[in-house]
Structures are given as structure tokens and as C-alpha cells.
Amino acid sequence: MAAFSDESLYRNSMMFEGEVIEHLTSWLSVNPYKGCSLKCAYCFRANWYQSDKPFQLYSEEECLEALLKHKAFVPNITPISINNSSTDALLPQVRKSTFRFINMLDELGYSNPFILISKLALTKNDLSALENLHALRPIFFTSFSLLPKHIEPMPVSIRIKNLARLKSANIPAVLYFRPIVKDWNDSDEIIKKALQVGQDYCNAICIGGLRMSPEIRAELQKVGEKLDEFPDEFDQKKIDNAIENRILALHQKLGLDVPVFKHSSCAVSFITKQQNYNLLFKNPENNCLVTCPPSQQALCNKGIV
């Protein structure tokens, strides 16, 4: 069994180039649009473009054709996302295209996991569309990092509403508690709140640190954040060990059972009940946490030879 993502993807600082299909580390991202108006200062998209006006690069038909021809696409298996590396899939200018593509793929009968990532509100129509999919298996990811407003201006209250509605609809959801940066959002109070929201509404939590590149550094400096201690290592999202240990300790102290993972592929694998498709279990010291459920550990252990 080969890993979905070659290890070189983790080192490639130009992995987000705005291609119609981007082979990311955890899924294939379909990118019909480019440009985002949310103004998150830490956003990795600054590494390859700066635009706050979403515009369409490719039609949904072109995206579908490119996806089905992509060498990494396996029908009913490969995780798919949309506008992951180019914009927010639920921006007003983008939403119609997002759901048109989802429906086109669903109508063809593909049952791939489909990852929808957004910080914006799901409308009733959006939720209905996800509930009524016949084949695709939707998983909703949202950032809930409780960052200072000058770094992430978007309010988090709408994200809690999204998660509550998704839970009521039995649509799996994953909470991104990242980036976690010392003195931004590493207090025990913030950690407890993020963990509790994940416990109350989500199937899993993913934690991680901050990507850094000259472009991201420039955006952070515009809002008064220098972060000289972070090297320009775009491929790294490593979280400070002391912060990670506090997260795990608080998770245990609070008596929570929501899984906490380091990698998106771990969350997708857990939700879809399969061993990690990037074979991360072969390097448990760097990839696995004690909060990985025994059921998932058993699945992954079957792949260790």
C-alpha cells in the first residue's frame, strides 16, 4: 500500500500554486476560484498570491474533467476538497460554484469523502444540499483557534452555530485548533474552550502550529506581529512541545473523549473508518498522539509490518 501523499509534499514550499487540481498532503483540492477577502494575517495563501477579490479561474466542468483525469484520483476513495488552497468555499462570490461542483460530482455517483472547509456561515440551503447528497460523504472542517482579532478578524460565533447545525444533521465535522502560537492563543482558558467546543460538536480536533514564509511574515508584520523566532519553513506546522503537552493534559483533566490529532488525514481516516491513508502510523513518534482512539490505533496497527 502506497501513501496518498509523497513525503516531498511536506517539504515543498510551492505546494499551493493555484493549479486547477492541487495534490495536497491530505486530499486533492479542486480550485475553481482564487482570492479571499477574510484577511487572516497568518494565511498560507500569501505564499503564492495576494488578492482579496475572489475571481473564477476555471469552470466547474473544467474542474470536474481535471479531477477525473488526475493520476491521484481514485473513484470512491480519494478525499476531495474544494477551494482549499485558493479561497474560502463559502464566500458569497464562490458559494454557488462550490455547491454546483459538489452536486455535479454527487450526481455521477462518486462516494469519495468530500471535505468542505470554511469559517463562514452555512445557510439553510447549504445544509440541505449536504444532507441530500446521494453518494458523496461530506466532512466539514472549520478553524476555531480563538486568535486575536487583528490576526483573524472573522468572528467565531457563526462557526459554533455551523457546528451545532451540522451535528443535528449528522454531518461529520472537524475542528481546526491551529495555528497555536505562544501568547496568541495558548492560555489554558483558550485551550479549554477550544477542546470543549470540539467535544460538544465535533468528531475530531486537529492541532498544529504556524506555517512561515517571507510572504506570511510580511502579512503578519503589517498587523504588528514580528515572530522573529519562527524560521522561514513553510513546510512545517510543528506545535511547541510544551503547548502540545498542556493540550493533552487538559484534554485528560477535563475527561474528554473527542479525538485530538496532528494531521487532517488522521481525522478523515478516523471518520471514514480506515487506516491512515498517508501511512503516518509508520512514524508514530512524530505523528501520533495518545488521544488517538483505540479503534483507530487498531486499524493503523494492521498496516505496520
Image: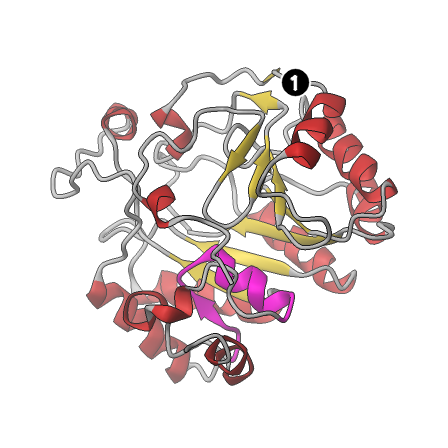
Compared with residue 176, is residue 276 higher up or lower down, i.e. above or below? Answer: below
Residue that carries the numbered disc 1 in the rendered image:
58
Q: Point out residue 224 in the picture as x, y percentages from the top left corner.
A: 22, 30
Look at label 1 and name its amino acid: Tyr
- Quadrant the C terminus occupies: bottom left
Q: Nearer the viewer, residue 168 or 88?
A: 88
Crowd tier of the residue under label 1, counting other residues whose Cα lies within 10 Å: few below 14, some 14–19, many 20 or above = some
Query: Residue at left 22%, top 40%?
Result: 233
Instruction: Give coordinates of residue 90: x percent, y percent.
Output: 65, 34
Q: Residue, x 45% and y 49% (percent of image)?
A: 5
Q: Give the total number of marks visible in the rendering.
A: 1
- Relative to 190, 276 lies left or right: right
> Hey, which quadrant is residue 49 in on the image?
top left
Q: Which residues are magenta?
A: 257-273
Residue at x 31% of width, y 67% of height? 188
- Quarter of the image where one finds residue 202: bottom right
Q: Nearer the viewer, residue 16 or 173?
A: 16
Left or right of 185: which side holds 140? right
Residue 16 belongs to the span the image colors magenta: no
